[in-house]
Image (cartoon, helix red, strand yellow):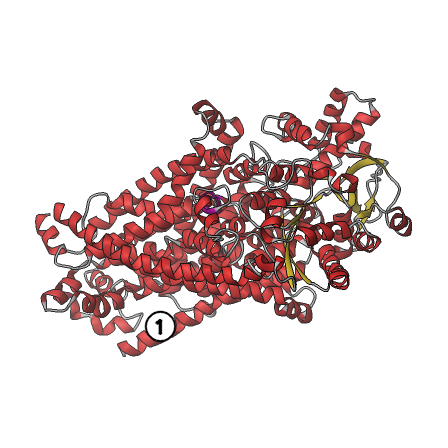
Amino acid sequence: MPDLHVVPSQATSPRAIVGQTEAPWIRWLLITVALGFLGLVLIVPLAAVFTEAFAKGWELYLAALVEEEAWSAIKLTLLIASITVPLNLIFGVAAAWAIAKFQFAGKNLLVTLIDLPFAVSPVISGLIFVLLFGAQGVFAPVLEAYDIQIVYAWPGILLATLFVTFPFVARELIPVMQAQGTEEEEAAISLGASGWQTFWRVTLPNIKWGLLYGVILCNARAMGEFGAVSVVSGHIRGETNTIPLHVEILYNEYNFVAAFAVASLLAVLALFTLVIKSIVEWKSGEHRG
Amino acid sequence: MGNRLRQRSVLPGFGLSMGYTLLYLSFIVLIPLSLLFIKSASLSWSAFWQTVTDARVLASYQLTFTASITAASVNAVFGLLVAWVLVRYDFPGKRVVDGLVDLPFALPTAVAGIALTAVYAPNGWIGQYLEPLGIKVAFTPLGIMIALTFIGLPFVVRTIQPVLQDLDKQYEEAAATLGASRWQTFVRVILPPIVPAMFTGFALAFARALGEYGSVVFIAGNMPMKTEITPLLIITKLEQYDYAGATAIAAVVLVASFFMLLVINLLQYKTSRRHMPG
Amino acid sequence: MKFQAAKVFKGLSMALLSTSMLVSLAGCGSSSAEQTSAPQNGTAAAPKTVELLNVSYDPTRELYQDFNNSFATYWKGKTGQEVKVKQSHGGSGKQSRSVIDGLEADIVTLALAYDIDAIAGKDLITKDWQKSLPDNSSPYTSTIVFLVHKGNPKGIKNWDDLVKPGISVITPNPKTSGGARWNYLAAWGYALKQHNGDQAKAKEFVTQLLKNVPVLDSGARGATTTFVERGIGDVLLAWENEAFLAVNELGKDKFEIVVPSVSILAEPPVAVVDKVADKHGTREVAKAYLEYLYTDEGQEIAAKHYFRPRSPKVVEKYANQFPQVELFTIDEVFGGWQKAQKEHFADGGVFDQIYKPQ
């Protein structure tokens, strides 16, 4: 559609043509409604978390974070997230490529199967791995013979986390790749680029936002998952407690400040992704300019 | 159609990507999930039927599915609005708000539940103003819906956002120069490519809401027949060491949500094909 | 379609290759994990340090933190061996399921005998475990008390006050919370005593009581939050040790404890997990650990953490802390946990029949 390129120079200035954007009052109305909604369901509850965390001052807040058990929980959580995100990232890209770029029978079935882990109650997500690898489970004889511990050790926590965060990257990428179509890749191939070259040079720059959001969500959920992990963790202090489990235990011990302090740490970790996003935005802006 | 198929197959990597997808899917999802059905098969048919159609269980299905659909619908509408505002407009604090959207995933669900209850309980920050109006949120189905909206929000915002960001403004500009009003442009030009992403976001938020436990139990009040969600009944079974009963209920929910997701995905697929370029 | 299937097959085999690499990587991970736990298995040969895993229920963290230190000193003095006790805390029923499913606990210290029975049911613990230590294998006890607002504005003194109209009672769901089962049985036992063992009257009493329950939290801690933070309810039913914790942590100026005339003797039991202890070669130290709970040192630590001690000497010392109350046991009134669980809390049991929200 080359004829559309008549107006590109105005694309950078937002209020170039009347009817190309909204009247200021509609703009502000929309912003107000959106922020009002976010305030009610998101921001006020978050404020409640931080208020509790700081209820007894900075000293207690910091004390909760430097505790040895909190540290081991943080380390375990970061370890699990650092394995989960790349594995699900590779899967997500592969699945999105196959699903968005090709036609085949049973596509919707496949997409729905990828969605399934979300619909499974977290406790069940953990339980299925206990049923597989637990002492009464399917593989119990093998595991016992070689004395391998999967559930109630980090491999079990990893499996449960992989399961609950499984769909994120794939599901973020599929709509983006579908919206993009296949023309650009086909052009690259017909000009003699190899498959990998096409992927790195053509596809990847096009899907970077979807990819980024997929990773952000996957990472946030991998660090925050409680239900499934709690079933396979065994809750051994200083060993198999992740941050969310540590929070739960502190809370159950009436250690309110510490519980919310560690929880707010998770919120801060999640905000780091904001920094990554800004960097990507800045870099891509640089490329464009 | 034939033309399109041939064009598509120009691209390489179908075998590798598809093979890896199927393998990884089987190992991480399908094989573990099959255990649900194997375990619940240890019940006799009549025991199975009795477990999954008990009056309390039926009431919980109704509550769980209604609350999940409501929450996902609210998210679909407001999620689109939030994504739109975040992508298209500038306002102070925008970046912070953008970052906050992911937090429902990062907060342990129990913390989310406690925080929401603290806000919406009769003596809570917002609850105290709703109470005189006769609106009760905490310990009612409304509270469950708010919790489910909270945990599902990132799905919708984050699936619409990338599509909106990549949307070529040229089409809008063209529509505007051709004399379309802003509303017409929105409905005819902007909305169609976003609708598939909305469906995806809805499906994910809905699926997640069905299984949610941690944040809901704090705000639900857990009254049998009234505010008792299905995942709670599954836990109740487990507390009695009744693995078969727990997996039976889980399997029923799983099959039901599988078909509902399948329908949503078919709709998503249809809308996305209609507006595919070319 | 056919040629695509061939492609898929090719892709599958390539993917298999890469996954097998991954699996072998994971294998390395787990074998290194094995190595770190190796000294545990080798204790019989070179008993320099020994590790125990104590799987316990929720509010015992501080109790066992103190106790583990005390025991480590005692054991070092006696045998010269270093002992490190790892702790796991969670809901009692869930902890029990974890041990059944392979959490390698040398010792379990849970909230109810029913949960240890379940482990014994899988042959991890001898069937008559409850006889292997004194006092039903429960070195410390607790009871169910009432937590009310400061000054007791509704004048709640005993169980009868809880069924009065307009009184709002907070207790968790007995189907998901072990503590709530003790609450329920305490009320039932009281009513039986009042009505000379008339089960129908007791059922009526508990039905009436449950009518005053506006919210059923899934756990004891959630119920405490509902009462303390949300300001819902006039009275919270709680374990005595948790009520003390709640008052200390959440406000001495806001709440006070009311002890009813009659209540149930809550006996949180302990046991060595035979199969695991034998595998780890830790039976001796695990047994000593539990026996140490019964010594004066152990009893004193329990009392400091608001559990009622068994030793008469320590009981006397802490007489001010624990008010006199007539206590009945679950064995006397309900014929043990197995029976009580089946009659009252199983699906379709008495609780399901009488609990109807308005």
* Relative to B35, A4 lies left or right: left
Could you tell me residue A251's position as x and y percent?
A: 64, 55
Look at the image and tell me whether residue A52 can be seen: no
Judge by depth and name the residue closer to the eye, A76 or A166: A76
Judge by depth and name the residue closer to the eye, C278 or C349: C278
Residues shaded magenta: A124-133
Residue lying at the far left of the rendered structure: B3
Question: Which residue is under mark 1?
Answer: A281
Could you tell me residue C335's position as x and y percent?
A: 73, 28
Looking at the rendering, which quadrant does residue A141 occupy?
top left
Q: Quadrant of the N terminus of chain C?
A: top left
* Relative to A68, C244 lies left or right: right
- Which residue lies at the image location 79% right of the left edge and 27% below the top edge? C191
* Relative to A182, B69 lies left or right: right
Q: Residues within 10 Å of mark 1 (few under 14, many from 20)?
A: few
- The secondary structure type at the circle numbered 1 is helix
